[in-house]
Image (spheres, rainbow, N blue to C red):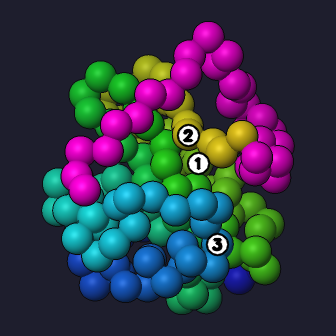
Amino acid sequence: MTELRVRAAAPEDVDGVLAFWKVAAEGTSISDDRAGVERLIARDPGALLLAESGGVLAGTVIAGFDGWRCHLYRLAVHPGRRRGVGSALLTAAEERFVRLGGRRADAMVLVRNEIAQHAWGAAGYGPEERWRRWVKPLTG
């Protein structure tokens, strides 16, 4: 595998990230649009991390920290480039959280995504069965 580079996304990456998620991400989000990704990058410039191999986008993760909790979203790895990309992204995200004062990270993982369940477990994460996610759309 070509050397992997992890960096924060910039505004000029938005279209590429959105196209990448259509290929590599499981499921969709209400925020999977230009305005949503631009807002994320503007509000927290270091949160959206990109992994590139040979100048090509190989993976993403959103490492959001609100000052209280560390949340991981959109860990997506290109299906043809799986070796080490997810691990590199999670390491970068966890290092970011520690620098910001975070003490525990959590991830949103689709129950039906067995590949992701295995990957998160291999990275040291475990399901928290005592909690359930409650959601209310704020628009539309």
Q: Where is residue 99 in the image (x, y as percent from the top left)?
A: 35, 36
Q: What stretch is highlighted in magenta?
A: 112-140
Where does the N terminus fall, quadrant-wise?
bottom right
Q: Is mark 1 on a helix, strand or loop?
A: helix
Q: Is mark 3 on a helix, strand or loop?
A: helix
Cα–Cα gap, marks 2 and 1: 13 Å
Residue 61 in sight in this render: no
Mark 1 nearby-residue class (10 Å; few <14, some 14–19, many ≥20): many
Where does the C terminus fall, quadrant-wise?
bottom left
139 drawn magenta = yes
Task: Give, as a three-letter code, the residue at label 1.
Answer: Leu
* Label located before the other in sequence (2 or 3): 3
Task: Give, as a three-letter code, the residue at label 2.
Answer: Met
Cα–Cα gap, marks 1 and 3: 16 Å
Q: In this view, does 117 lie to the left or right of 136?
A: right
Q: Where is residue 88 in the image (x, y as percent from the top left)?
A: 62, 56
- Disc 2: which residue: 108
